C-alpha cells in the first residue's frame, strides 16, 4: 500500500511511503483483537470492590421472635441477607482481573488493528514534526489543517516528544503515543491514525518476521 506523505499543514509533501503488506495488508483476526482489548481493559480495573457478608456485619444476634407460632419463617439474626442491612450473599471481593496473553497473540492483534484501519482508509502518514514549546494552539492548528476536528485521532510518533505530547494532551479526542508504546486498544478506539514518517519503519521492524 502506497501513501502520500502529508505536511502538518495538510498538504502533499511530494514524498511517498510504501506500507508493508506483512502488517497493513493482512487479513485482520478479529478474535485476537478482542482478546487483546479485553486484556487491556481488564488490566485497568483496580479490583478493590468489596461488599460485607453476614459474618462481617455488626448487628445484633438476638433472637428476633419466637421460633414457632408466628406464621412466618424462622429468624435468628439481623445479619441475615433476608433483612435490610444484612450481609450480602456472594458479594464482590477484592480480586485481580488481569490475565496472560502470549506475545505472538498480542503482536498479531496489533497487526490486525493496523490492517483493519488501513483497509478502512483511515491511515495517513505525516512528515516528522515537533513544536518549539508546548502549545495547545499549535496542535489545534494541525488538527484543523488535517480536517480532524471532532474526530478521534491517534498520532503515532517515532520517539517520545514532550512538546508534542503536552500540546495535544488537553485536546478532546486526540491522543499522542510512540511506535514502541502503541497498543491494540488505542488503535481500535481511534477513528484516524496519523503515523509520523519516521514511525513507519519502527512499526514495520517491530512486527517483521
Image (spheres, rainbow, N blue to C red):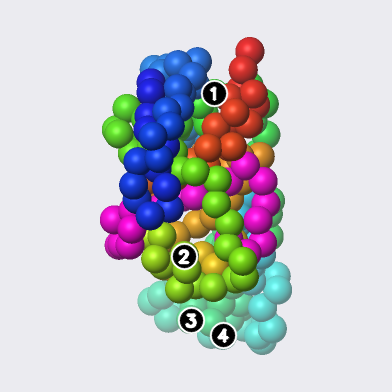
Q: CA distance from mark 1 to mark 3?
A: 51 Å
| Residue 35 or residue 56, whichever sits in front | 35
In this rendering, the label closer to the viewer, 1 or 3: 1
Q: Which residue is mark 1?
A: 108
Q: Mark 2 and mark 1 in contact? Answer it, CB < 8 Å.
A: no
- In magenta stretch: residue 146: yes
Q: Which residue is mark 2?
A: 139
Choose the circle earlier in sequence order: 2 or 1. 1
Q: Secondary structure at mark 1?
A: helix
In this rendering, the label closer to the viewer, 3 or 4: 3
Residue drawn 41% across and 75% down?
72
Q: CA distance from mark 4 to mark 2?
A: 68 Å
Q: Which mark is residue 64?
A: 4
Q: Position of residue 50 (x, y in %)?
A: 63, 67
Choose the circle earlier in sequence order: 1 or 3. 3
Q: CA distance from mark 2 to mark 1?
A: 32 Å
> Is 112 positioned to the left or the right of 131 in the image?
left
Residue drawn 43% across and 53% down?
8
Residue 200, visible in the rendered structure: yes
In this rendering, the label closer to the viewer, 2 or 3: 2
Q: Vertical placement of 124 versus 30: above or below? A: below
Q: Which residue is mark 3?
A: 84
| Label 4: how many Cα within 10 Å (few below 14, some 14–19, many 20+) | few
Q: Among all residues in the image, which is located at the extreme top?
A: 209
Amino acid at each position: 500500500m502506497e501513501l502520500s506523505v502529508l505536511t502538518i499543514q495538510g498538504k502533499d509533501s511530494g514524498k511517498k511511503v510504501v506500507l508493508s503488506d506483512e502488517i497493513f495488508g493482512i487479513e485482520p483476526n478479529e478474535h485476537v483483537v478482542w482478546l487483546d482489548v479485553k486484556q487491556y481493559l481488564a488490566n485497568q480495573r483496580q479490583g478493590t470492590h468489596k461488599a460485607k457478608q453476614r459474618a462481617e456485619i455488626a448487628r445484633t444476634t438476638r433472637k428476633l421472635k419466637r421460633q414457632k407460632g408466628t406464621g412466618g419463617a424462622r429468624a435468628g439474626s439481623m445479619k441475615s441477607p433476608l433483612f435490610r442491612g444484612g450481609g450480602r450473599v456472594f458479594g464482590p471481593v477484592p480480586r485481580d482481573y488481569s490475565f496472560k496473553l502470549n506475545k505472538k497473540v498480542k503482536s498479531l492483534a496489533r497487526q490486525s488493528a493496523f490492517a483493519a484501519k488501513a483497509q478502512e482508509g483511515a491511515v495517513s502518514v505525516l512528515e516528522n514534526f515537533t513544536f518549539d514549546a508546548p502549545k495547545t494552539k499549535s496542535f489545534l492548528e494541525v488538527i484543523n489543517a488535517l480536517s480532524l476536528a471532532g474526530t478521534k485521532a491517534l498520532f503515532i510518533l517515532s520517539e517520545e516528544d514532550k512538546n508534542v505530547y503536552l500540546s495535544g494532551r488537553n485536546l478532546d479526542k486526540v491522543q499522542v503515543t510512540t511506535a514502541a508504546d502503541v497498543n491494540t486498544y488505542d488503535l481500535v478506539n481511534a477513528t484516524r491514525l496519523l503515523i509520523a514518517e519516521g514511525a513507519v519503519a519502527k512499526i514495520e521492524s517491530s512486527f517483521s518476521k
